Image (cartoon, helix red, strand yellow):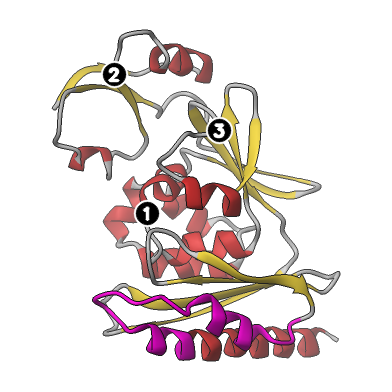
Amino acid sequence: MIGEYFRPKSVDEALALLTEAGKDRLPMGGGTSLSRQQAGGFDVVDLQQVGLATITENAQGMIAGAMVRLDTLMTHEKAHPEIGRAIRIDASENMRNMATLGGWLLSGDGRSILTTILLALDAKLTWAPGKVQVRLGDWLPLRGQNQPGVLLTEIGWQTGSQLAFDYVARSPKDRPIVIAAVARWGSGRTRVALGGFGQAPIIAMDGMGSDGVDIASRDAYFEAEDQWASAEYRREVAARLALRCVTRLNAIKESEA
């Protein structure tokens, strides 16, 4: 049950509220996950007016505030088209208008295409206080344990890389049971992320060149079994999807040559 409601005007004010001794307070972004919490009483710190809802670019790439709505990111002119496609599949129109990027990463599971794509892109999270940066791939396995900071403020990733994803679901309206996302940089570095299983997507491969993406994907999902699909099925489908993504990237490269 929600007790007191606060609406701070800055990150510093939000941090002061969230760290006040003896108080049980939770940050609220779009409210899509917080509204489902039923156990116990807690206060809410609404982050709508603290200045975390902008998308900017710098020499390293794109930086999205944690309060950026999924719909805003989906329609941003500089966002990779695959990011927009992933959001359309992941979330309904109503959800896209409510959910924030930070909240999506904090509360989502391994069946999110957007989270899988950002993992492939080697996205970095910034936390306050102290502007502590941590790679998404390092944080996801420990999510829910000790956080790098009090408040997630930004998510950043490099632009200019090639990116492709593919997925399989039991029906067009079902959530994915296997996702493969492949990012490739100009240096040749290739990073393969797999989703559709567990609490978070995982990295199957990160190295120079794309040889062996199928083998790496098959090995990474060796024990990926749950009520939705067997591990054997996921291994074989992950391998095929990863190869399909690489084929798409190669075709793009050839068309640009």
In the image: residue 168, left or right of residue 182? left
- Name the residue: 42% across, 54% down: 71
Q: Nearer the viewer, residue 254 or 132?
A: 132
| Disc 3 packing (10 Å; few <14; some 14–19; many ≥20) | some
Which of the two labelled residues, at mark 1 and mark 2, occupies the earlier sequence position?
2
Q: Secondary structure at mark 3?
A: loop
**Does the magenta run of residues contain 230?**
yes
Magenta segment boundaries in residue numbering: 210-237
Instruction: Indicate the position of residue 243 as horizontal and vertical percent values.
Output: 61, 89
Residue for badge 1: 108
Instruction: Indicate the position of residue 80 as horizontal and vertical percent values.
Output: 61, 65
Quick check: 253 above or below 6? below
- Name the residue: 40% across, 29% down: 48
Q: Is residue 224 visible?
A: yes
Q: Secondary structure at mark 1?
A: loop
Give the Cα distance between marks 2 and 3: 19 Å
Residue for badge 2: 24
Q: Nearer the viewer, residue 225 or 131?
A: 225
Q: Quadrant of the N terminus?
A: top left
Q: Which amino acid, by three-letter code, is at mark 1?
A: Gly
Which of the two labelled residues, at mark 2 and mark 3, occupies the earlier sequence position?
2
Quick check: 160 above or below 35? below
- Name the residue: 47% across, 34% down: 146
Q: Which amino acid, by three-letter code, is at mark 3?
A: Pro
Q: Which amino acid, by three-letter code, is at mark 2?
A: Asp
Residue 232's disc number: none
Residue for badge 3: 148
Give the Cα distance between marks 1 and 2: 22 Å
